Image (cartoon, helix red, strand yellow):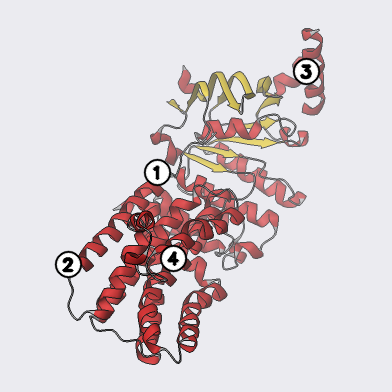
Amino acid sequence: MTDDFAVLAKKLRVRRQKTDILHGLNLTIRRGAITGLIGPSGSGKTTLMRAIVGVQVREGTLTVLGKSAGDKSLRPRIGYVTQSPAVYGDLTVLQNLEYFAAMVGVERREAHAAIEHVQLTQQERQLVQSLSGGQRARVSLAVALLGSPDLLVLDEPTVGLDPILRNDLWRLFAELATQGKTLIVSSHVMDEAERCDDVVLLRSGRVLWDGSRTALLKRNNTKSVGDAFVAMIEEAAHVSR
Amino acid sequence: MYHVRASLATARRITRQLSHDKRTVMLMFLAPVLLMGLLRWVFSDTLKVFDSVAPAMLGVFPFVIMFLVTSITTLRERTGGTLERLMATRVGKADIVMGYALAFSLFGVIQSLITSLVAIYVLGMDVMGSLWFVIAIAIADTLLGVALGLLASAFAKTEFQAVQFMPALIFPQIIVCGLFVPLAQLPNTLEVIAYCLPLTYAVDALNRVTEQLNVVPEMWRDVAVVGGFIVVSLVLASLTLRRRTK
């Protein structure tokens, strides 16, 4: 039963300096799908992602790929791309990928394959600090693809990219999903949710919706996820009144 | 096998990073030589004083420079998110620390060799004992700087703080290590403190090797103490690498 889910959270709570960032969340994320983690900045998206990846101190139950989040055996199975690209600016693209390939424990040729995936072969020998912000973000994404992990957790991977490139990346995500990978992609842009199979709507550390995008639209009788989000916020406000 | 590969890859990566920063490498290798030359110039009329101060400096330079370079590089790794990324792989904390120690020792060895050779053959520093022992101590000092730098970086949040650790942690050791005033002439309490600090032993070993023809037991004691500090600092430093944070 729990094996159908990539992520299963029960009463997941994260506190920082006595304030709750996540207020006891319950949510599930399906395997083999693209799930959009949507919410305004400060809603707890990054914290939730960090918890799933296992680098966040937390309370409550959080099961990822059948194991408790942070379990040692999960490390090679999860690829995580942080918001600011965590790569070495003073190394070339290829040197970055070669290094991380060694750390992940995969063959060196996987480095080239990952660079090809994110379309940076031409910039392979350039120093990362000389690249544009979008290119740097793709280097970081390429690192996460090493070792072809089952679960990819991507924090705002398409911010600041030109529309063509954004399209290409979403196509790559879709391709990965058809290979059976699970993708969790965060964004504060509602449009991006339209590209996802499922959505998790997050606001002020609480889950407004988790599940199918089409079901969300149907339930609220709206055309876009953005409108549905507004409807759900109003509904929540109404209930609490 | 994986862990060896990870350590070597980390060492190689750091070497590559530094090799892209030619100015830092030049400064690392040339600054100690120039300082040594300056010292020799200052003591032009009192070469005996130069002979007594210069060996200690061979230990102080790599110690200070490696402390700085290591603490800042490691801090960047901590704040830039790459450390978190590494900790998400199966790499062991010890692999990363070993990689750092390996890479910076390489730079330290080259630096010590250049400085020692210039000091001895160009500036005429007198060494009675083995040149190899001088270099070995200088390398140990390099490692000590690396180890303390790794450890200090855990307590700094910004590069400004990391740099400030030098006057806070390193300068006191230089002042009481016997370089300015022989240990026996220090006030009693200060003498006890000096014997608790690693640089004191490194400087003592260097002074002895330049004054004595043979390796005496005190030198082995010095090497052992410095080695102990290196091991303890490296172990503590690897404990400060965290997989999970608040």
Q: Circle 2 — which element? A: helix
Residue B239 has which mark? 1
Query: Which residue shows up at 60% across the image and 66% down it?
Result: A127
Q: Mark 3 points at which residue?
A: A232
Task: Identify the subunit bearing mark 2.
Answer: B
Closest to the camera, between mark 4 and mark 1, is 4
Closest to the camera, between mark 3 and mark 2, is 2
- Residue A156 against residue B192 in the figure, above or below: above
Tell me residue B179's x, y (percent).
40, 71
Q: What residue type is labelled 2?
A: Pro
Task: Identify the subunit bearing mark 4.
Answer: B
Tell me residue B93's x, y (percent).
39, 47
- Residue B150 against residue A177 in the figure, above or below: below
Relative to A150, A139 lies left or right: right
Report, in whole angstroms, how far the alpha carbon at label 4 lies from the one at label 1.
Answer: 27 Å
Q: Which amino acid does label 1 sit on?
A: Leu
- Could you say which quadrant of the image residue A28 lies in? top right
Tell me residue A183's x, y (percent).
58, 36
Report, in whole angstroms, how far the alpha carbon at label 1 lies from the one at label 2.
Answer: 33 Å
Q: Circle 4 — which element? A: helix
Q: Name the residue under label 2.
A: B217
Q: Which amino acid does label 3 sit on?
A: Met
Query: Which residue shows up at 56% across the image and 21% down it?
Result: A12
Task: Identify the subunit bearing mark 3.
Answer: A
Q: How many marks?
A: 4
Proximity of marks 4 and 1: CB atoms separated by less than 8 Å: no
Q: Is residue B92 visible?
A: no
Residue B174 has which mark? 4
Residue A128 has which mark? none
Closest to the camera, between mark 1 and mark 2, is 2
Q: Circle 3 — which element? A: helix
